[in-house]
Image: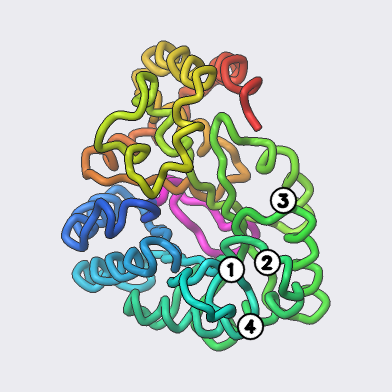
Amino acid sequence: MQYRRLGRAGLRVSTLSLGSWITYHHQVDAGAAVEMMAAAYDAGVNFFDNAEAYAGGRSEEVMGAALKTLGWPRLNYVVSTKFFWGLDRTGDAVNRKDTLNRKYLMQAIDGSLRRMGLEHIDLIYCHRPDPHTPLEETVRAMNDIIVQGKALYWGTSEWAAADIHAAWELADRHGWHKPQMEQPQYHLFHRQRVEQEYAHLYTDTGLGLTTWSPLASGLLTGKYQGGIPPGSRGAMESNAFLRDGLTDPRRNAAVAALAPIAAELDATTAQLAIAWAARNPRVSSVITGASRREQLASNLGALAVMERLTPEVLARIDALTKPLAT
């Protein structure tokens, strides 16, 4: 396993990490989580990603139960969570969802700590921007969570570059803890934000990235070329919003054309896609997902593919995918 610093922070995270979105609670119970997290840890993975909203908090509970069973030294692993959507999107309590106000954030961290059974969470993210809360209020609340020892670093997820820079400047002006990392979507068909919009932030603020969806929700595995197979992530009713993207004919044709390139590198198309995302030096960690141990092992095999991505190979990949990228 390779390890990279989280932007300018001293913290080092594994180049490939394991996330819980969609899988934990829905497809992976605590027993399976123990098995896969142990396998990932044995392979050198030290970063495990979560969010308050995943499965309405139950994803955090599954990961917390697994961590308790595994009993690893706390210094040996990094855990994250994210705040914005809340646990319950029903009812009339306006401060429980779709917000980054101080009241919500100060209670959200306590809930996550309780569900995960931890004294602190290493990385906390503002899961989406909140245009209705003053930015200064959000930045100060995230700073205060760190000052209280409930988290170590904070960052954003899917924020515009201008908003990240404004948050960083606010923190710098007041002597508060600055946002250290962003968690954007990044894969062969979604690259503009990481490669262009954020470009100045890497030098201006030292922004680190923990990117998600390297397989475009499974599109880059090639399994959606014939439609939505039963039992797949795309077949889950809660993921109906993904289906148009997964069945896009032009992108599926490009994925099919990637298969021979992957075969030349003794890799699967999925391993090629993960290696492509991880080869970007601005990416601190690529968050992978798995519902089975075999899938996890295959994803981790992408590490060996990275060194085979020569400029010539990368040019061939770009010729197939870049015209279809956003």
Q: Is residue 195 visible?
A: yes
Q: Which mark is residue 130?
A: 2
**Mark 4 closeness class: few <14, some 14–19, many ≥20 residues within 10 Å:** some
Q: Nearer the viewer, residue 307 or 122?
A: 122
Q: Earlier in the sequence, mark 3 or mark 4?
A: 4
x then y, percent, for residue 260: 41, 11
Determine whether 88 is above or below 159 in the image: below
Distance from label 4 to label 2 (Cα)? Answer: 12 Å
Asked if marks 3 and 2 touch (Cβ < 8 Å), the reply is no
Magenta stretch holds residue 3:
yes
Q: Would residue 246 be found to the left or right of residue 162 on screen?
A: left
Distance from label 3 to label 4 (Cα)? Answer: 28 Å
Distance from label 1 to label 3 (Cα)? Answer: 28 Å
x then y, percent, for residue 279: 54, 35
Q: Earlier in the sequence, mark 1 or mark 3?
A: 1
Asked if marks 1 and 2 touch (Cβ < 8 Å), the reply is yes
The residue stretch that appears in magenta: 1-17
Q: Is residue 305 visible?
A: no
Q: Secondary structure at mark 2?
A: loop
Asked if marks 3 and 4 touch (Cβ < 8 Å), the reply is no
The residue tagged 1 is 98
The residue tagged 3 is 202
Please name the residue shown 65% across and 60% down the image: 8
**Mark 3 closeness class: few <14, some 14–19, many ≥20 residues within 10 Å:** some
**Mark 2 closeness class: few <14, some 14–19, many ≥20 residues within 10 Å:** some
